[in-house]
Amino acid sequence: MEDAEKLQLVFQTLGEANRLRIIKFLDKKESSVSEIVEATRLSQPLVSHHLRILRENQILATKREGPFVYYQVKDTRLLDALGMFLDIFASWKSKETSRPLFVCPPWWKRMR
């Protein structure tokens, strides 16, 4: 798999707000599903669905203790990278520009 394809998979995995909320919560400590449900106020099936996707894509690691499974961010550098993205986007918004950062050409120009 090419680097671009790997990055695409990571960004697709992280491109969902609920998954980012879960990752942000797991920044503080490893947690069980019930703790994540309580903190994010998402339903248990929805949290389990997102945890499965994050785990399958190597974002989260798990640890079993008795009947409980605890989740944690596999590589904390990801948290640093997400923080850097937030800083970058905040600086973009703070700069007043007379034009948007990206403008999609009118549909008739795309048809050529």
Image: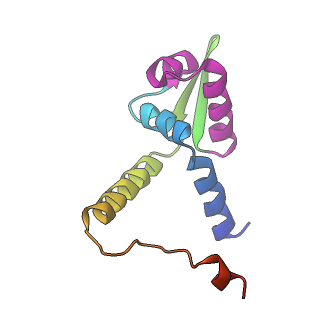
Q: Say if 74 sits above or below 35 in the image.
A: below
Q: Position of residue 9 (x, y in %)?
A: 66, 56
Image quarter hosting the N terminus? bottom right
Image quarter hosting the C terminus? bottom right
Q: Is residue 73 visible?
A: no
Q: Position of residue 27 (x, y in %)?
A: 41, 36
Chosen colour scheme: rainbow
Q: Residue at x 68, y 65 (%)?
A: 5
Residue 51 covered by magenta stretch: yes
Instruction: Spot the residue most to the front.
Output: 108
Instruction: Tell which of 83 and 60 is nearer to you.
Output: 83
Q: Which residues are magenta?
A: 31-58
Residue 99 covered by magenta stretch: no
Q: Quadrant of residue 33?
A: top right
Q: Residue at x 59, y 26 (%)?
A: 63
Q: Quadrant of residue 97?
A: bottom left
Q: How many marks?
A: 0
Q: Say if 104 sits above or below 39 in the image.
A: below
Q: Position of residue 59 (x, y in %)?
A: 58, 44
Q: Is residue 4 visible?
A: yes
Q: Position of residue 61 (x, y in %)?
A: 59, 36
Q: Residue at x 50, y 46 (%)?
A: 75
Instruction: Tell which of 24 and 2 is nearer to you.
Output: 24
Q: Say if 16 sits above or below 7 in the image.
A: above
Q: Say if 23 sits above or below 46 in the image.
A: below
Instruction: Spot the residue most to the top.
Output: 67
Q: Which SS does the magenta portion mostly show? A: helix
